[in-house]
Amino acid sequence: MTENVTRAISGAVYIALLVFCTLFSTITFHILFTVFMCLSIYEFSKMTNYKSYYLFSIGGILISILFFLSQLPPINLIYLALGCVVFNTLLLFNLFKNISFHKYHKTYSHFFLYITLPFILLLSLPNFINPAKYEIVLALFIMIWCNDTFAYLVGKSIGKHKLLESVSPKKTIEGFIGGVVFTLIASIIISRFYTFFNVTLWIISALIISIFGTLGDLVESKFKREAGIKDSGNIMPGHGGVLDRLDSVIFVIPFLYILYLIYFYYA
């Protein structure tokens, strides 16, 4: 089996699993993303040479409160979302100042929260609509996939100017722009089917996904570069680990959450 075929099959299974679990029931939705969270923690602990048993002991406690927290009204999680945004901003400062992330490893709990807290916000996203609309999460994933796919295709075809060569040599400015354009198109199409958000909110969501999703990918690339590895894991043949698939999601969710809080509670 060729690498491209393996990659295609692996990607198809991942997409089918995500679509089914997100739309089938609340229970399957929560189970899927709890599993994703645990796998992301495990991969990150390996990447940073941290003791995974310690992380899983904390993870077990977090999982027990994950469902409860996600059922709270979204406004109750505003400080959690703001904390994530502040921490992500600090990561971006270090990224562009070329400051090593390794100096934070002794206070790794910060990075543990960097992975887990966005999952709590993600599980709460459907609650912005009454009754809960799990299609919100699916639509966001579609836009993230669109951004990643077209950034890669456009960059590979016409990319000449590097975006941040010291961290990710293959990413280009042309690819980034291509990702933005096609994600905006996807958001307009999505707005025709999912009318619980108006087209303006979908477009703003697409812009946030394109910008901060790309930055999240660069942040994880820096982690992997400092760890001397190409992929965070190998659970998805041809795609790497779960963290490789969810790095953009983890980084972008807090910013989207703040956007929706402003729109639904303060606008």
Image (cartoon, rainbow, N blue to C red):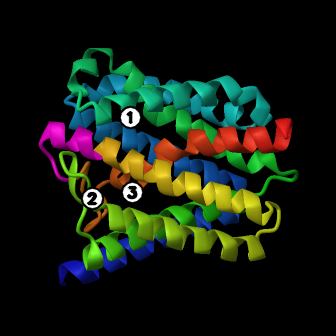
Q: Could you tell me the amino acid type at mark 1?
A: Leu
Residue range (magenta): 221-230
Element on which disc 3 rests: helix
Q: Which residue is mark 2?
A: 240
Question: Residue furthest toward the right?
Answer: 130
Residue flagged by tag 2: what amino acid is it? Answer: Gly
Reading the chain from its start, which is encountered first: label 3 or label 2? 2
Residue located beneath label 3 in the image: 245
Cα distance in 3D space between marks 3 and 2: 8 Å
Residue that appears at 30% across and 36% down: 96
| CB-based contact (under 8 Å), mark 1 and mark 2 | no
Horizontal side of residue 71 vs 250, given as left or right = right
Q: Nearer the viewer, residue 8 or 181?
A: 181
Distance from disc 1 to disc 2, alpha carbons, whole Å, reads 24 Å
Q: Amino acid at mark 3?
A: Arg
Q: Is residue 196 above or below residue 91?
A: below
Residue at the top extreme of this rendering: 106
Q: Which residue is mark 1?
A: 92
